[in-house]
Image (spheres, coloured by chain):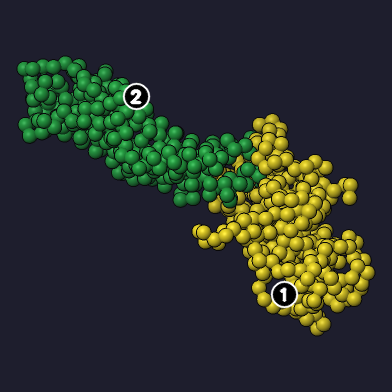
Amino acid sequence: MSDQALSPATASHPALGRRWPGQDMPLLVKIALLWLIAMVLVAIVAPLISPFVYTAPNLRNRLVPPGTLPHILGTDELGRDVLSRLLISIRISLLIAFGASIISAVLGTTLGFLAAYFRGLVEQIVLMLADFQASMPFLILALSVLAFFGNSLALLIGLMGLFGWERYARISRGLAISASAQGYASACRQLGASPIRVYLRHILPNIASTLIVSMTLVFPEVILLESGLSFLGLGVQPPMTSLGNMVGYGREYITRAPWIMLAPALTIVFTTLAVSVLGDWLRDKLDPTLR
Amino acid sequence: MSEALLTATDLSRTYGSRRGLFGAITQVRAVNRVSFSIAAGETLGIVGESGSGKSTMGRMALGLEAPDEGEVRFAGQPMPASGSPAWRAQRARMQMIYQDPLGALDRRLPVIVQVQEPLDIHKIGEPARRLPLAQEMLARVGLSAEQMTRYPHELSGGQRQRVVLARALMTRPDFLVCDEPVSALDVSIQAQVVNLLVDLQAEFGLAMLFISHDLRVVRQVSNRVAVMYLGDFVEEGDADDLFAAPLHPYTRALVSAAPVTKRSSGHARIVLTGEPPNPANRPGGCSFHPRCPLAIDRCKREAPVLRSVEQGFGRRVACHLVEPSSTMMGKAA
């Protein structure tokens, strides 16, 4: 490589030619990634690929065990096709989990940055809210909100978005303060950069790995929380279905027809596991100093 | 001086520090009524031991920290409040070099992107022209094209400091504060970086405030030198004059402690006794008197003021024993 070739034509912008991780992906991570991609694809095309209408009862074929064609995963207590219900459930649950995780990450990080930037009163208020959130079991908060405001999918996603924000807020506030007190952020401020530039272009990428790990911890919890709420009958309401909803209603038949409950339960387990595995791997990969 | 680029008048900065959870707040006077001015293209070196208020003064000169008393004027204008749009715009004219270059660089961005950033921030030049300009500057400070696309942790300490230097010079500033710029580097690299700094200063016509505890480096870089002790200027003057004939007892002790290759027989080392006092608990009178080998009764009662003496141009000393017209103390060194 020629050392002194400095013409603009030969030197490509390094940010564009950034090495993208991928070659050295461990098998487990590959499986996790494939699983998640499959889940997202299923969520997108669920209505098109589901063999039956997920709400259509068929009382002659109640509690058909899996493997009996045309019901690959069997039917439930009303003779509804479990596979069709599972596909739709994945769609709804992923929508809630992704939507809620993103809302809570954005909300928490923004509040954390505001606290770090303004300090003083703003910081005290944010920390007080975070303490309030952390000290109260979220399920109780969720129950009371749903009991008062009824429920709709949008409300449920918004409510779940409040779950876990205090972790992002605390992490981002702490890291932003330590970064601004010394090092690259204060150097960048001294260059004349606006606070928005300092926070979004420098601090955020630097703390992203921590936030992503935190997100992979919150994501499974959101899925489980939604499942829990649906199980209690306060989450997704029938005839709409979700993974937790299926587990909840399938429990009555756990001895006679365990497949009603097992299919969504295994989906929850694998999806949350896949997110954790992928997040763990991403954290290492996103840090250029560990490459 | 009318052509002064930066003037600081009676700068003071006091920090409150609390001892323990319920302890009373003690006032630490980091910088105590210090005045100086720097002309365009001139370097003022600041020497002093740890805790003497050197860095605080550098931060106040840049407006990063507001002085409690006194005022900094840059190019005739008072310093805008830190973080205000006017202050941010002014950063294009005044920059800083840090002691720890790795800490001052963003680990997640290739160095070329960071060197280009000041142009993006201040919207200087067309966007397409900024990358070649950054490459030019990095080549000027001695980085190869291949090193430019690396991340900070992939470079050596000297290379990192070159990157920081290149980034600071991108906006063609008039004034640079160097806070211990070579202290974290190997001795072999120090000389290279110092030489580069001197070259660049001449090339860009920079005024510099050069903060260091290394007398050799300060002497090499500076036109004028000020010696700080516990937040006070104890002596100020032309760099060569001051090191050749230090007047203040503290300066003399410092100069005698600097390693020289050939020590003449009459050049006895002055060893100061005691520790540098806690800035929170300044001695009364002259703050140096508990450690001063020449202290007289008056030093305990009365703090000396910085005043001009005859030796050398613009020489100022804060010591009762150095008479304004005396030559007695000068010849001792």
> Mark 2 packing: few (<14 Cα in 10 Å), some, or many (20+)?
some
- Percent x, y of residue A189: 63, 43
Q: Point out residue B187 in the picture as x, y percentages from the top left corner.
A: 66, 65
- For label 2, the residue is A155
Q: Residue at image x 40%, y 34%?
A: A104
Residue in the image at 56% along x and 40% along y? A118
Q: Is residue B245 above or below residue A155?
A: below
Q: Which residue is pictured at 31% across the width and 39% down the height? A: A137
Q: In the rendered view, does A117 fall on the left or right side of A6?
A: left
Picture quadrant of residue A39: top left
- Tell me if mark 1 has few (under 14), some (14-19) or many (20+) residues whose alpha carbon lies within 10 angstroms of its own: many
Real-space CA distance between mark 1 and mark 2, rounded to the nearest whole angstrom: 72 Å
Q: Is residue B140 visible?
A: no
**Residue at (10% x, 16% y) in the render:** A58
Instruction: Please tell me whether residue A33 is drawn above or below residue B217 in the rendered image.
Output: above
The residue labelled by disc 1 is: B290
Q: Secondary structure at mark 1?
A: helix
Q: Chain B hue? A: yellow
Q: Is residue A116 above or below residue A66?
A: below
Circle 2: residue type: Leu
Which chain is disc 2 placed on? A
Pointer 1 chain: B
Residue A218: x percent and y percent? 35, 39
Chain ID, green in image: A
Query: In front: A28, or A239?
Result: A239
